Amino acid sequence: MAAGAGERVQELVARLGRHPAAGLGLDLAREEDLAAWLVLACLLTGRAAEERAGQAFRALRELGLTSVGALAAAEPAAVAAALAGAGYPAPERAAATLVRLGRALRARRRGSLARLGSEALGSDDLATRLVRLAPGFGPAGVLRFLRPLRDHWPAAREVPLAPAARSAARHLGLLAEREDEEGEPGALRAALGSLPGAPPLADLEAALERLGSRACLRERPERCPLGADCPRRGRPRG
């Protein structure tokens, strides 16, 4: 990375926000918070905007409905009512998925996500185990759940960057054209490791994904939240 890159990535995260799990105070090294992150990841994969998904998660957390045991014992209608009260779209569908996940984990892994992660033989096996837990929790939700767990579960280390995050990283000069196209984001990780005071990879990836979803992935610099600081402003597309 070029000189000043450390300050640039710190500013980017400060401006666009940390990873949703970190923003809600979740510690993914703790089993309880790991289950809560699974709930939040499911909500984020739905139709709701990130802010609305966060509100729905907080509503469930206030009712004690973010643990595997609580979800496994809950009635879908009660979960749906909490989601609807927070304005979450299609609350019945999301509630059914969350309750199925809780019950499947309780039945197959004694309620332990950490056990599931430690037993997986690699990223493909891990993703398959998660997808098979419940209808409604598909590949997009699984990838979202696994990305911040690269440093916690060896089997998750090869999970690739979100496409929007990679597009934004390229536009900002954090990645070269063909770096981190698939598999572990080793180039971005190595670059961050060389910067003093750099944010965690999960926080940077989340900020990049927000940026990329708004502008970079569709080559829409006029929509870039960085405004005049967008490096694509005034450049031809392509």
Image (spheres, helix red, strand yellow):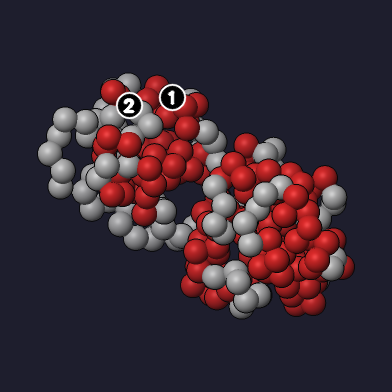
Q: Is residue 41 left or right of residue 81?
A: left
* Along the viewing direction, whichever of 132 and 74 lies nearer the viewer: 74
- The N terminus sits in image quarter: top left
Query: What x and y, as percent, mark residue 232?
Result: 22, 34
Q: Quadrant of residue 155?
A: bottom right
Name the amino acid type tagged 2: Gly
Q: Quadrant of residue 175?
A: top left
Name which residue lies at 15% across and 34% down.
Answer: 235
Q: Quick one: label 1, few (<14), some, or many (20+) residues within 10 Å? A: few
Query: What x and y, as percent, mark residue 113?
Result: 70, 63
Per the image, the residue denoted by label 1 is 11
Name the amino acid type tagged 1: Glu
Residue 33 in view, yes or no:
no
Name which residue lies at 32% across and 42% down.
Answer: 215
Q: Quick one: label 2, few (<14), some, or many (20+) residues within 10 Å? A: few
Q: Which mark is residue 227?
A: 2
Q: Is residue 202 left or right of residue 69?
A: left
Q: Residue furthest left?
A: 236
What is the spatial separation of the Cα atoms under label 2 and label 1, in whole angstroms?
Answer: 14 Å
Name which residue lies at 83% across and 61% down.
Answer: 78
* Pointer 2 or 1: first along the chain: 1
Q: How many marks?
A: 2
Residue 132 in view, yes or no:
yes
Q: Is residue 75 left or right of residue 16?
A: right
In the picture shown, does residue 222 fall above or below 144? Answer: above
In the picture shown, does residue 135 fall above or below 232? Answer: below
SS for dot 1: helix
Query: What x and y, as percent, mark residue 126?
Result: 56, 70
Query: What x and y, as percent, mark residue 204?
Result: 46, 38
Q: Is there a contact, CB below 8 Å, between mark 2 and mark 1?
A: no
